[in-house]
Image: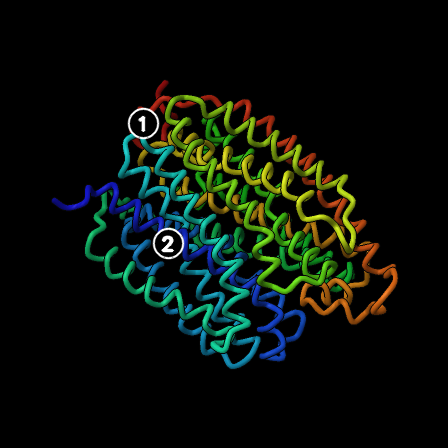
Amino acid sequence: MGIQYKYVVLINTTIGAFMAVLDSNIVLIALPTITKDLHATPFEAVWIIMGYVLVTASLLMTFGRLSDIFGRVKLYNLGFALFTVGSALCSVAPTGLALVGFRLVQGSGGALIFSNAAALLTDAFPATERGRALGLNQVAGTVGSVLGLALGGILAGSFLGWRSIFWINIPFGTFATVWAYSKLRELSEPHRGERLDILGNVLFSGGLTAFLVGLMLGALVGWAPAYLGVMLAGLVMVACFVVAETKVRYPLMDLSLFKIKAFATGMASNLLASIARGGVSLVLVFYFQGVLLLDAFTAGLWLIPFSVAFVTFGPLSGYLSDKAWSRGLTTGGLLIISVAMFWFGLFPFGNSSDYLELLVPMVLAGAGGGMFVAPNVASVMNATPAARRGIASGMNSTLLNTGFLLSLGLAFAVMATSVPTSVLQGIFAGTASSICPPAGPCAVLERFVGSLHSVFLIMGFISLFAAVPAYMTKRQKVGYTSGRGVPTE
């Protein structure tokens, strides 16, 4: 007897989530080795990480819209193939700039995967099982982040070199691509008569890119008028995008979905929660490698409790959300994240901090995230009309990735006000120890440590704010009117 189709979808999308998230963390840990080997400039080094996430966030809406027009399975399959090809190209990159370009190819494939995975799961699973399925899918991504932290350090320091971190995607990606093409089938009805919103694509992708590029350059290089101008131009483009979406027949972002209360509040809490927790791992990596002078492998291992707590609570919260406990789980998870962030904000970071003292807030932050994610995704997708789940999935993933980027930008901006940019870049590359004397206090690193408290306190307040729309999100009954109308109660 063959595997039930819903489990075929779950396994395949789980592989996709695992690979896409694995590649984010595995490159993060190996970045100092990559930078030294390719003689990459600081700007190129940053874009090896940021470019992947930025192109994913920029294209998610576009690909979600295309999936509603041409079919979710076709676009998802293309994403797996593109991600695998991008991984192969990254493994042979001759320069830092070439690696940035190949990472954009990878990110495009990741965007195709992310924009369709939740919609495919929602189509394949009944409403009473969606929370569990989405929870397992999210956990796979977190497992990928755990292994990425460890594998990146092991492979980058081995005789295989940093290029091997991309090799591991090729066999898994090839298998998953072939399996997806042979087994997945279209359950939704493509709207082939609709047209792609070209103007909306340009305004949204261009505006998001401009704002985030200006934000990151301002944080890393300095808040010159040119970078502030780029940020302002991005905001103007996003504002024009919102106006344009009300004028076109087939908009990129279906703003009518925000008339559904459960959808609107779920999306708002998703964005704020992503801002609150997105930069935590990266900030801690900075602390572990730049201040405590740990090697990449050890720093990755020290972060594992954070992800293990997420993995532990993710499936449980997904199961409980199917039992109509969604609002309590999402609100409670965000409040727990707030406690963890405030704990970090008051933690006496130093050059000899006790790791055991960091375990409690890390576990709390991971557990709170695990409690929040699956019930939130399930509430958003359950509140969406079946014909619009492709675009809803893309919108949800876009906000998640945008929040992550804003979180990183916020962290960089706060830290850049405390230490020179060159020092911040040195901490990022793991070479800041050369700035300080071999013994005695280091004023520059002490200022950097002080900025960590501000970062975590800000994230704590954002998480508290995110709990408000989460509490307002009521469980949506499944059953919808046809077309793009508001779901029935």
Left or right of 369 on screen, residue 453: right
- Direction from residue 215 to residue 445 in the image, left or right: right
In the rendered image, which residue does mark 2 sit on? 16
Quote the CA–CA distance across marks 2 and 1: 23 Å
Mark 1 crowdedness (10 Å alpha carbons): few <14, some 14-19, many ≥20: some
Q: Outermost residue toward the top?
A: 489
Mark 2 secondary-structure assignment: helix
Q: Position of residue 420 (x, y in %)?
A: 81, 63
Q: Amino acid at mark 1?
A: Thr
Whether residue 272 is visible, yes or no, is no
Q: Residue at x 52, y 46 (%)?
A: 307
Pick the quarter of the image with the C terminus.
Answer: top left
* Relative height, residue 337 to residue 205 (above, below): above
Name the colouring of the figure: rainbow
In front: 473, or 343? 343
Task: Tell me where residue 244 appears, x and y as whole percent.
Answer: 51, 44
Residue 125, image x and y in percent? 28, 35
Which disc, if any, is residue 128? 1
- Amino acid of disc 2: Gly
Residue found at the very far left of the displayed protein: 1
240 on left or right of 73 = right
